[in-house]
Amino acid sequence: MDNTKSLSDEDKAKVQQPVTPIQTPPPECVNPKDIRLFRDPPWKLRLTIAGDRSYLMVRVVRAAPLSQPSRYICFLDEKNEVIWTVEDPSVLDADTRRILEEELDQRYMTAVIEVINSLRNEFGVSYWDVQTNRGNREFVVRNVSESAQWVSARRLLLIDVDGNRFEIPDIDVLDKRSFGLIDMVI
């Protein structure tokens, strides 16, 4: 049965036209000056590309957190898909850059280990009790061979089972006992 008989000629023409997808510029065509980060409500990060579109929930991550921490920042949507990547965040406006830095500082907050009080390893899981620049902390690292990364010959980064980051900027600065404990586990 043809349901278009009761429609006017103008309405019939509208029904028969193919629907075209919304055209959005590819990420490489976005001008960094058009990017605006803001919080609304205060705990939710949002992004707007001026004259184009807005994203109601955004996360920012470093594409190369160890080798290039101040470059190549990715903006992710609620599905963790990349919206856009900025090679050099200094090209962003001051307010957006400030919010970006706050978000990255919060996401990549790293406690610096100053002293290792105790460290034991059982069946591939290591239990750490340390003094950091943020106070005394106890944490667990599963599979140290994967969760400990040597950033340089003397700098060690540890990621615990909860995703918290702990850093030893220079293992040579540690006291002899702390150094010996690390040497037993890593």
Image (cartoon, helix red, strand yellow):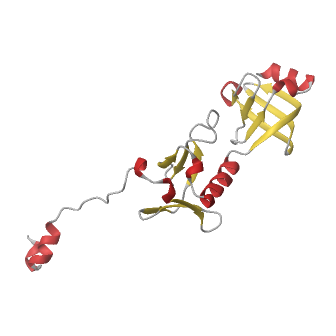
* Residue plotted at (85% across, 42% down): 133
Please tell me whether residue 180 is drawn above or below residue 25 in the rendered image. above
Quarter of the picture containing the N terminus is bottom left
Residue 62 on image: x %, y %: 59, 42
Residue toward you, 165 or 39: 39
Left or right: where does residue 10 sit relative to residue 139? left
* Residue plotted at (46% across, 54% down): 31
- Res 23 quadrant in image: bottom left
Residue 173 on image: x %, y %: 87, 27
- Res 178 quadrant in image: top right
Please tell me whether residue 175 is drawn above or below residue 137 in the rendered image. above
Left or right: where does residue 81 sit relative to residue 141? left
Please tell me whether residue 61 is drawn above or below residue 123 in the rendered image. below
Residue 76 on image: x %, y %: 52, 50
- Res 145 quadrant in image: top right
Please tell me whether residue 178 is drawn above or below residue 19 in the rendered image. above
* Residue plotted at (10% across, 74% down): 4
Quarter of the picture containing the C terminus is top right
Residue 116 on image: x %, y %: 87, 31
* Residue plotted at (43% across, 53% down): 30
Residue toward you, 68 or 156: 68
Count the labels in the image. 0
